[in-house]
Image (cartoon, rainbow, N blue to C red):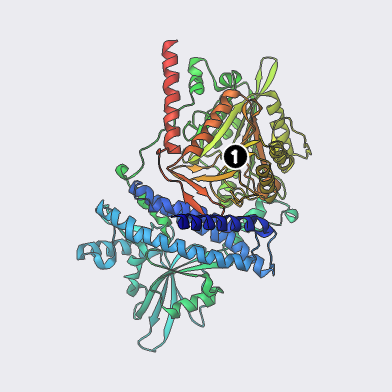
């Protein structure tokens, strides 16, 4: 027995020695951001693999995983390939990996994830859906009546929009558009004996799966097309057909300093994006070596860029399956509740949202608190209110048909001064932003497209209202976009306030965004790229003591200067809890470096999106909310804003949110000193999303009871 204990002691000592060695190596103080992002997507994939979740929710998470991976290759992998092409052999981030090293590690990790994705779909989700009457059918499994139906669908709806493109001396290899699904066809001319390659694009506007008349069976669109190739290549023998998909570099590379018109520059760059360099080729597992080599050659890709996939390509198409009216296979619906204090904001009853905010600041927490009866209500009432003089708002991502956009247009038509700062460079939303920005301009809204060299990412709104002899400013500073759709899916917090100092800050921030202000000393706001980095570091430094306390919730933690400051605070004895949904380059729990730091991630029904930063204990607490993650891009290359929350009751609510995140043992993962994420074992069954729903209902119930008593 004693010998066994000695062995354990030796193993423990060895483990501690290894961790100390890690901390001693400067190039391993930070985890690699790209691999950390893949770890995050692995946590999303784990939800698809979790058979305790409703079945269509698992299918949804598989679709999210697939779409996330697409974006990763379009941006992150593409960026690393650009670095290699430019001859950059090292990395400025200090993680010790060259672009080539990182691409190799990404390849190894992605292969494992793709294998898990295939197993989750083919061996688990698809069979389980089949048992529930939602069947993914192969053409060979259909009977004559089914095939007759699909022949009719093909001839009426699919055939007219197909365009086969031959490759021969007179027809060069066609351009393969980004993320398009295609068929590679080898045909043989029985007369001349020649063999030719042809590419057939699967029309992206058609549904990914053809739904059979019973509404329960789904046939991949590419299989329906493949079975009718004789109509597209009459007189030819079809030797082989296989599906493939290309991913291209889709990141914008604007030369803003040289652009006379940012709107025109973004529109031109969007056209160029379609022709970005290929970075990944996905092929059906049955694709022949001949076809694979041809595609790699024509796309200028290497073997490490090839991924053979078993099962349907483009599993993002599972969203169509998730949309089926099968509520028993989904999470129970959640209807956001009106924040209790805002329930009085009813103009017919004599109260408005302005009178409520005058009585004290309001904290809203979406999707638990309704976005429609809080943030949207503020803008809608402002648009109608004759006492409102001006509305100013930043818009990063929103839906063009949103009530907020309609309210801004209505306000402009009423003669109010309306300013919308639209960020045209919001990745993958550029085209949509351009469209509704033009609609706002046509309605008389003053549309500004941001600052040269910076993305405007802050989530701020300012309403200027004349009240007797006083002009009062009403503010909203939040962590989420002004988007009514994502507000039901993303977890975010926001502050509604008429604090004069905050109002002055927002006024000066908008002047900075729309004019030539160089204001750098704000009263309450922490603003990037002007003051935010310095102020965050100062607040961490204030907690770099044995009695220090830091608790922060964010999407990503990447910035090395901030990480080093947190390491120093830990070494001084400060207690640090970090809740990081996505990328985390800090290595927690390393003896002598980060002993007092814990890192966890909550991944589940809602996308954790809020940024909450807490410093200090008890009466010395300082809390901030806002748009910024702790990444170089947020601190240095974006316009961001964090607002202080000073009301004790609201601070307690923020602390309550953080406490629930820290207590979660259902959705939570923890990061170890070895850089490995581990699922937190379930003991108390604390589910952050469920618990916050319960608290929202409880607040509503208490408010109702108080109203009845009154």
**Residue 159 drawn at (x, y percent):** 36, 65
**Quadrant of the snapshot with the N terminus:** bottom left
Residue 456, quarter of picture: top right
Q: Is residue 502 above or below residue 82?
A: above
Outermost residue on the top side: it is: 710
Q: Is residue 204 above or below residue 174?
A: above
Left or right: residue 654 versus residue 685 is right
**Residue 445 drawn at (x, y percent):** 63, 36
Figure disc tally:
1
Q: Is residue 517 above or below residue 702?
A: below
Q: Nearer the viewer, residue 413 or 681?
A: 681
Outermost residue on the bottom side: it is: 192
Q: Nearer the viewer, residue 141 or 90?
A: 90
SS for dot 1: strand
Which residue: 49% across, 78% down?
Answer: 294
Regarding residue 638, the answer to whether it shows in the image is: no
Which residue: 37% across, 58% down?
Answer: 120
Residue 392, quarter of picture: top right
Outermost residue on the left side: it is: 144
Which residue: 67% across, 37% down?
Answer: 546
* Callout 1 crowding tier (Cα within 10 Å): few <14, some 14–19, many ≥20: some
**Residue 122 drawn at (x, y percent):** 34, 61
Residue 142, quarter of picture: bottom left
Left or right: residue 39 versus residue 691 is right
**Residue 123 drawn at (x, y percent):** 33, 60
**Quadrant of the snapshot with the C terminus:** top left
Q: Is residue 220 above or below residue 642?
A: below
Left or right: residue 383 versus residue 324 is right
Q: Nearer the viewer, residue 547 or 210?
A: 547
Outermost residue on the front side: it is: 2
- Give the residue at mark 1: 552
Regarding residue 463, the answer to whether it shows in the image is: yes
């Amino acid at each position: 027995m004693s010998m066994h204990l000695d062995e354990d002691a030796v193993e423990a000592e060895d483990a501690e020695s290894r961790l100390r060695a890690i901390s001693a190596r400067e190039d391993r103080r930070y985890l690699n951001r790209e691999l950390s992002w893949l770890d995050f997507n692995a946590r999303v994939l784990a939800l698809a693999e979790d058979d305790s979740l409703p079945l269509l929710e698992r299918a949804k998470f598989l679709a999210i995983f697939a779409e996330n991976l697409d974006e990763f290759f379009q941006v992150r992998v593409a960026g690393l390939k650009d670095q290699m092409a430019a001859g950059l052999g090292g990395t400025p981030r200090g993680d010790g990996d060259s672009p080539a090293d990182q691409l190799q590690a990404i390849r190894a990790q992605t292969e494992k994830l793709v294998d898990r994705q295939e197993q989750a779909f083919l061996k688990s989700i698809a069979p389980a859906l089949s048992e529930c009457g939602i069947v993914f059918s192969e053409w060979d499994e259909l009977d004559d009546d089914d095939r007759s139906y699909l022949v009719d669908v093909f001839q009426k709806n699919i055939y007219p929009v197909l365009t086969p493109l031959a490759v021969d001396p007179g027809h060069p290899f066609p351009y393969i558009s980004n993320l398009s699904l295609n068929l590679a066809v080898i045909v043989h001319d029985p007369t001349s004996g020649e063999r030719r390659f042809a590419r057939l694009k699967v029309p992206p506007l058609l549904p990914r799966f053809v739904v059979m008349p019973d509404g329960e069976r789904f046939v991949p669109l590419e299989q329906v097309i493949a079975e009718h190739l004789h109509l597209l290549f009459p007189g030819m023998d079809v030797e082989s057909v296989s599906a493939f998909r290309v991913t291209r570099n889709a990141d914008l590379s604007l030369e803003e300093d040289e652009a006379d018109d940012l709107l025109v520059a973004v529109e031109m760059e969007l056209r160029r994006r379609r022709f970005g360099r290929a970075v990944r080729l996905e092929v059906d597992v049955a694709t022949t070596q001949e076809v694979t080599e041809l595609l790699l050659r024509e796309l200028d890709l290497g073997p490490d860029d090839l991924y053979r996939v078993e099962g349907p390509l483009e599993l993002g198409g599972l969203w169509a399956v998730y949309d089926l009216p099968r509520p028993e296979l989904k999470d129970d619906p959640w209807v956001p509740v009106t924040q209790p204090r805002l329930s009085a904001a009813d103009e017919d009853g004599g109260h408005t949202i302005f009178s409520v905010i005058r009585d004290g600041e309001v904290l809203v927490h979406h999707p638990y608190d309704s976005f429609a009866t809080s943030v949207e209500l503020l803008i809608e009432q402002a648009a109608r209110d004759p006492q409102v003089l001006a509305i100013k708002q930043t818009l990063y991502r929103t839906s063009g048909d949103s009530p907020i956009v309609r309210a801004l247009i209505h306000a402009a038509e009423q003669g109010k001064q309306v300013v919308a700062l639209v960020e045209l460079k919001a990745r993958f939303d550029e085209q949509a932003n351009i469209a509704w920005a033009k609609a706002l301009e046509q309605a008389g809204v003053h549309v500004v497209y941001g600052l040269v060299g910076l993305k405007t990412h802050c989530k701020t709104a300012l309403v200027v209202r004349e009240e007797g002899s006083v002009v009062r400013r009403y503010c909203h500073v939040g962590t989420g976009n002004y988007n009514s759709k994502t507000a039901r899916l993303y977890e975010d917090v926001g502050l509604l306030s008429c604090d004069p100092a905050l109002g002055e800050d927002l006024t000066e921030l908008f002047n900075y965004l729309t004019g030539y202000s160089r204001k750098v000393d704000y009263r309450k706001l922490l603003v990037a790229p002007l003051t935010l980095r310095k102020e965050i570091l100062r607040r961490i430094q204030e907690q770099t003591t044995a009695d220090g306390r830091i608790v922060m919730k964010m999407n990503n933690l990447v910035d090395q200067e901030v990480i080093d400051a947190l390491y120093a605070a830990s070494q001084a004895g400060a207690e640090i809890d970090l809740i990081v949904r996505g990328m985390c380059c800090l290595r927690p729990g390393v003896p002598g470096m980060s002993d007092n730091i814990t890192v966890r991630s909550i991944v589940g029904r809602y996308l954790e999106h809020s940024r909450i930063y807490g410093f200090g204990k008890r009466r010395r607490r300082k809390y901030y909310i806002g748009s910024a993650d702790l990444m170089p891009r947020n601190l240095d290359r974006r316009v961001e804003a964090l607002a202080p929350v000073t009301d004790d009751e609201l601070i307690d609510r923020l602390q309550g949110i953080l406490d629930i995140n820290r207590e979660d043992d259902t959705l939570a993962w923890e990061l170890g000193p070895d850089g490995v994420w581990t699922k937190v074992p379930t003991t108390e069954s604390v589910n952050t999303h469920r618990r916050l729903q319960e608290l929202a209902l409880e607040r509503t119930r208490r408010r109702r009871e108080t109203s009845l008593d009154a």
